[in-house]
Amino acid sequence: MSNSLSNATSKHIDNSPVLYLDGVSVSFDGFKALNNLSLTIEKGEMRAIIGPNGAGKTTMMDVITGKTRPDEGIITFNTSANKGSQSTTDYDLTQYDEADVANLGVGRKFQKPSVIESLTIFENLEMSLKGGRSIWQSLFHKLSPEQKLKLDEILVLIDMAEKADDLAGNLSHGQKQWLEIGMLLGQEPELLLIDEPAAGMTDEETMKTAELFKTLAKTHSLMVVEHDMDFIDALNCKVTVLNEGSVLAEGTLQEVKANEDVIEKYLGR
Amino acid sequence: MKQTNTSSSNMKLGPLTTLLMNDKGGRRLLAVLAALAILVPLLNLFVPESSIFHVSTYTMTLLGKYLCYALLAVSVDLIWGYCGILSLGHGAFFALGGYAMGMYLMMQIGDRGVYGNPDLPDFMVFLNWQELPWYWLGFDNFSFAMVMVLLAPGILAFVFGALAFRSRVTGVYLSIITQALTYALMLAFFRNDMGFGGNNGLTDFKDILGFDLQADTTRAGLFFCSALALMIGYLISRFIVTSKLGRVLIAIRDSETRARFLGYRVEYFKLFVFVVSAMLAGVAGALYVPQVGIINPGEFAPLLSIEMIIWVAVGGRGTLFGAVIGAILVNYAKTYFTGAFAEIWLFMLGGLFVLTTLYLPKGIIGLWQQMADKLAAKKMSKLQVGDLAEGEKA
């Protein structure tokens, strides 16, 4: 709760967006996966990204999270150094690798659920908890009461309190997606990058997930890549359409759906 | 659940409780090892040779050798079973530990060598060397040699691992370069001017810490130390795999990218466990050398490193005690079959690996667990039938 408050106050003081991409290009063997891409996500904003296959959605996530280094362009992540503090710092994400970016506060959920199958749900979540990433800290790690509380909270949120000790590998596809979202929350990131969360989910699960995201959006900035139009409709947020590595259109779902270019290149006539 | 029968013994052990809580196999293994460590030397030293309970020195030394292999297997399982690093060159670390011990033992020979030179080992006199090379200095001191048993493999693993893991060399590529590493070391140690005895290696050891290596009591002591080292090595490994670090290792094994995006610096974790594993292998080598009486470049042979993988696979990967069982069983089979039908042993070893991979992906431990589960299921269904019958009576 206090988080959302401090976020709200800092919004007045510091208006810099949480994520700022400017002129980002990446090419693989001559193929331009990202072509002069520019994009801004405000603090506390939820943004949906849509676009045809090969539009560069996953590559964009890769460059933000340090997996791929862009050929050119600027990627800036703006975050308060510690919770509640009002001073913020800009980080040039192109200078960091995956682990650094994750620890700065950018959480990523993959398209394919990648929970650690041979660990239990509880262990998966425990591993995701913020802090304690060094060798010694991991070797002599003991859960603090606050961490236990936090874990219980997440378990309830993702509806898995009863089966905390089940192997993650035994979960259904939809449940794995949820566990992974739970793991994302454990990291306490400021910005969540979520790749096709509704893929392979039943309609009911999809709507439940949309509700969950709306709750999350109160305290986090979110970027959601999705194909499912009903899901995006349920999210009720600003939409960016990517095509051939750059932004084709931006606006509400209704607006982009009415956009001529989008109809021609993505939705089809 | 099944803790009730063992909780009392765990209570006394204190910190061991948490380590071995869910490790029934490990508890049994440690109990057996502790019993062996005490019984075998006693039966060797104090039971007359005529008695059927007498354990011959030959058998004791052989068992001691198996225990060294078992520790080596634990070290391989630690990185392969838990972190997915398939090292096909772990023999290098074993041999380096062995050479460190061998150098100490060479220095203990003093002027009792063939040439009677008090300062130089025989092979150096033979090569007309005038003084000890710098890297032999200090090896007349036992403590220094023991530190080197840990440091030599540890430093090699650190440098090699830092380079390989930083450049994100994984999977089969990593296996190939580890294999190349041990092969390169073998070729290097074969050269006389490396100063490690070349082809013949280091041998003709006389005594260790002043105890005659041929004496039964010394052999018994070495056996005891091997069992102890295996127990300690097992507990260290167990401590690592039951900590959160162990779960990070499993995460790396299952999905390296996922671990990275969770904010874990995968290369540091790999490096840590690789170095610990190399040091354990070094200790195994150091205990092996005084018992077999020789260390030569043959220990670097890639084939031996591959054999270690087979021990772990046969026993059951990712269980630690499975590695111990696999190492002992395969080596017992090797001892027996190389004696009885020497020419077909390699075919058997290869066949064993193929069969294990095809039919026993979890090794002997997995098979055991499967049978136990089936038995439990049978019991359950019987109980249920019993319940039903009782219900009908009522």
Image: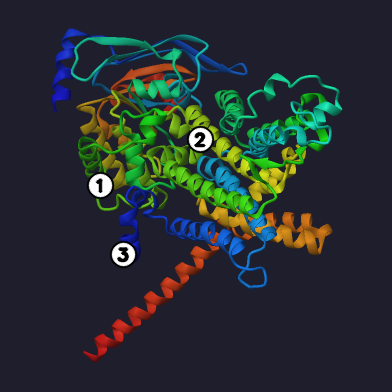
Same chain for mark 1 and mark 2? The answer is no
Answer yes or no: is residue B210 visible.
yes
Position of residue A187 relative to residue A163, above or below, is above
| Amino acid type, residue under disc 3 in the picture | Thr
Q: Is label 1 in a helix, a strand or a loop?
A: loop
Measuring from the top left, give residue B195's x and y in whole percent.
77, 26
Q: Quick one: quadrant of the N terminus of chain A?
A: top left
Position of residue B90 relative to residue A77, above or below, is below
Q: How many marks overall?
A: 3
Residue wearing tag 2: B273
* Residue closer to the observer: A189 or B46: B46
Question: Could you say which quadrant of the image residue A150 lies in?
Answer: top left
| Amino acid type, residue under disc 1 in the picture | Asp
Q: Chain of mark 3?
A: B
Tell me the tag on residue B4.
3
Q: Is label 2 in a helix, a strand or a loop?
A: helix
Label 3 or label 1, whichever lies nearer to me, is 3
